[in-house]
């Protein structure tokens, strides 16, 4: 049971470089999310998607872009990485809008920007 | 504004003793409440939820939580802690109207043998 798969698991970027984080889910969930986790700050929502071809901003969208070209994939892009974007990034999906059944999370991408 | 407070950064208990991880929340309307557990280098895993109905909800791995509307709390409990319960625990609340989830900052539970 794959669930939510994130690649890569680790990455080190230099300031100003760009990269794309990949998220894939095999549960046919409509809703997908990108969160970042920082010590003592819980999880903060970056962007989310309510279906194929749709995206919306979360709490901390600046510096990030997303795309949902296929239902099963949700991509997070950093166009010009900054040290403040050093974090652990989690992709999640949910079956419904109200998240009655909870989120299913990937195992995370640990990104360091130097 | 919607918020979740986990007042303890760290909870230490001895194996076999009961454990409680505290969570209080603030939200307009009826809340959906969740607990998640995160093991090192892993994503968050769903433990249990309160949507409606009985105030005491049971979840995975022997955990339970009690919804207290008057105290706006949703404390996580387990009657007898295991060393393997050591992990980071997150409480989350979702506003059923606005559809927004808020996570607490997390509580590190350490169970010592």
Image: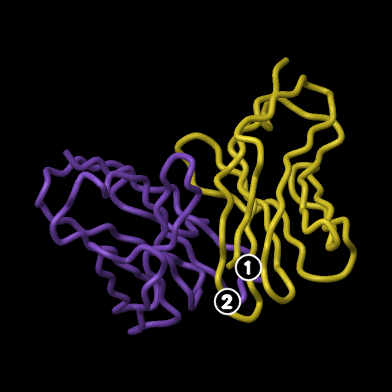
Chain B, which colour? yellow
Please, what secondary structure does the residue beneath circle 1 have? strand
Decide which of A32, A112 is in the foreground and name it: A112
| Residue B47 as seen in the image, left or right of residue B19 | left
Name the outermost residue toward the front.
B1
Q: Is residue B111 above or below residue B1?
A: above
Quadrant of image for the N terminus of chain B: bottom right
The image shows residue B23 at horizontal and vertical percentages of 71, 48
N-terminal of the two: label 1 or label 2? 1
Residue of label 2: B99
> Mark 1 touching mark 2, by CB under 8 A?
yes
Q: Locate residue A41, reporting x and y percent.
A: 47, 47
Nearer the observer, A4 or A77: A77
To which residue does mark 1 refer?
B94
Task: Sort mark 2 into few (<14), some (14-19) or many (20+) by Cα contacts within 10 Å.
Answer: few
Gap between marks 1 and 2 measured at Cα: 6 Å
Q: Residue at x 61, y 47 (%)?
A: B90
Left or right of A32? Residue A104 is right
Picture residue at 66% right of the left edge, 41% below the top = B7
Snapshot quadrant of residue B92: bottom right
Q: Is residue B102 above or below residue A41?
A: below
Callouts 1 and 2 on one subunit: yes
Which chain letter matches label 1? Answer: B
Is A61 drawn above or below residue B87 in the view shown? below
Task: Give the residue displayed 27% in from the left and 49% down from the top.
Answer: A85
The numbered dot on residue B41 is none
**In the picture shown, does residue B61 fall above or below B18?**
below
How crowded is the residue under tag 1: few (<14 C-alpha within 10 Å), some, or many (20+)?
many
Location of residue B106 (image quadrant): top right
Which of the two residues, B11 or B52, is positioned nearer the viewer here?
Answer: B11
- Identify the colour of chain A in the image: purple
């Amino acid at each position: 049971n794959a669930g939510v798969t994130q690649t890569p698991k680790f990455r080190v970027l230099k300031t100003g470089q760009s990269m794309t984080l990949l998220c894939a889910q095999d549960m046919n969930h409509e809703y997908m999310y990108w969160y970042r986790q920082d010590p003592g700050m819980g999880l903060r929502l970056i962007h989310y998607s309510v279906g194929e071809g749709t995206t919306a901003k979360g709490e901390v969208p600046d510096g990030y872009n997303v795309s949902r070209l296929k239902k099963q994939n949700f991509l997070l892009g950093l166009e010009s990485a900054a040290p403040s974007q050093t974090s652990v990034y989690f992709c999640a999906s949910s079956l419904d809008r109200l998240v009655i059944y909870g989120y299913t999370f990937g195992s995370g991408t640990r990104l360091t920007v130097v | 504004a919607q918020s979740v407070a986990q007042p303890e950064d760290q909870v230490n208990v001895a194996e076999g003793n009961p454990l409680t991880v505290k969570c209080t929340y603030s939200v307009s309307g009826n809340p959906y409440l969740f607990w998640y557990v995160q093991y090192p280098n892993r994503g968050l895993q769903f433990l249990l939820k309160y949507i409606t109905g009985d105030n005491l909800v049971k979840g995975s791995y022997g955990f339970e939580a009690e919804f207290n509307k008057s105290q706006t709390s949703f404390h996580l409990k387990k009657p007898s802690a295991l060393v393997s319960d050591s992990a980071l625990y997150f409480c989350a609340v979702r506003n059923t109207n606005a559809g927004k989830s808020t996570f607490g900052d997390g509580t590190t539970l350490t169970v010592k043998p």
